[in-house]
Image (cartoon, rainbow, N blue to C red):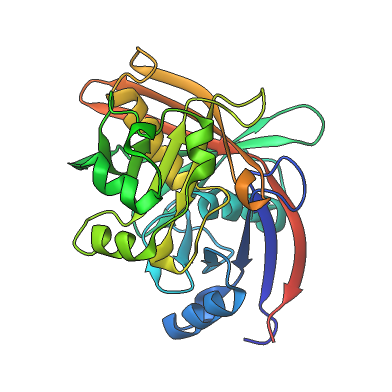
Amino acid sequence: MNGLTFYIVDVFAEEKYSGNQLAVVRHAERLSETEMQRIAREMHFSETTFVLSDQSREGGFDVRIFTPENEVDFAGHPTLGTAYVIQKKIIQIPVERIVLNLKVGPIPVSFQKKSGDHSILWMQQIHPTFGSTLPSEQLAEVLCIDTNMIDTRFPIEQVSTGLPFIIVPLTGLSALKQIKINSNAYDRLTENLWAKIILVFAPEGHHKTADLSVRVFPLCFGIPEDPATGSGNGCLAGYLVKHRYFGQPEIDLKVSQGHEIKRPSLLHLKARETGQNIDIQVGGRVIEVAEGQLI
């Protein structure tokens, strides 16, 4: 592994050391799956990505994503963070679009230039798949809140755009702030479920620039709470459009996440119904934090 370069970036960050941190390892074709898994465990971020080669293949860059526990087919902030590293460190010239070849399939990432040196990166997610709904009483027990804090006008539903989530609508920000996970109830709930990660959302932002607030609990990956979750918010975007949460078949909004764990993030969501499908884009900023060598 000597000489392998890695980068640390903050994804969905409004400033350095906010958002969700990611390690990206370059020239990873030399590594076995066991070595990738060990590095991801040692890095101990929610995910670590491995760019197999500096050369594109079939129009995209081959990338693998590992949590500390296992490899996953898709995850949101690793997709954006890795695309940023490929553009800045491998291609090193401005581009409008990069494709990542992930296990879930090719995921395109586009670069939208903003003021100064800031860019918003957007990923096009695959169309959402919707699973079964769940009872509010069971989720209230898991979340340690009263049942009346769950907005029963909308279902608690399992949704996936490559990684499945349980989407839970809450009545407001006060309910979201009160949540504490009952780990025993969580284990009972998720034991036989397709989705094992819980995303709760409230129709208020932590600050005036956000339209919604979100918290995500991926206990199945050994992580109590995630500061910014692109895949989960993509599932949320599909859910909001399907159920006409804002009364229309499309959305364009901002979501705040991570405030409760002191890693504030801001995610951009766009989605619209197109025939039988829902087109989803998730965007945000990426900020480079560090560069190093594996030894």
Which residue is pictured at 45% across the width and 65% down the height? 64
Whole-percent x, y for residue 188 in the image: 25, 63
Quarter of the rendering containing residue 136 = top left
Whole-percent x, y for residue 243 in the image: 28, 23
Q: Tell me the quarter of the image containing the N terminus.
A: bottom right
Image: 219 above or below 270: below
Q: Tell me the quarter of the image containing the C terminus.
A: bottom right
Does residue 165 appear anywhere in the picture? Answer: no
Front residue of 129/95: it is 129
Whole-percent x, y for residue 122 in the image: 54, 37
Which residue is pictured at 53% across the width and 54% down the height? 226
Quarter of the rendering containing residue 45 = bottom right
Q: Residue furthest right?
A: 116
Side of 23 relative to 219 (left or right): right
Does residue 199 appear anywhere in the picture? Answer: yes
Side of 45 relative to 223 (left or right): right
User: How many discs mark residues in the rendered view?
Assistant: 0
Which residue is pictured at 71% across the width and 46% down the height? 93
Which residue is pictured at 71% across the width and 52% down the height? 88
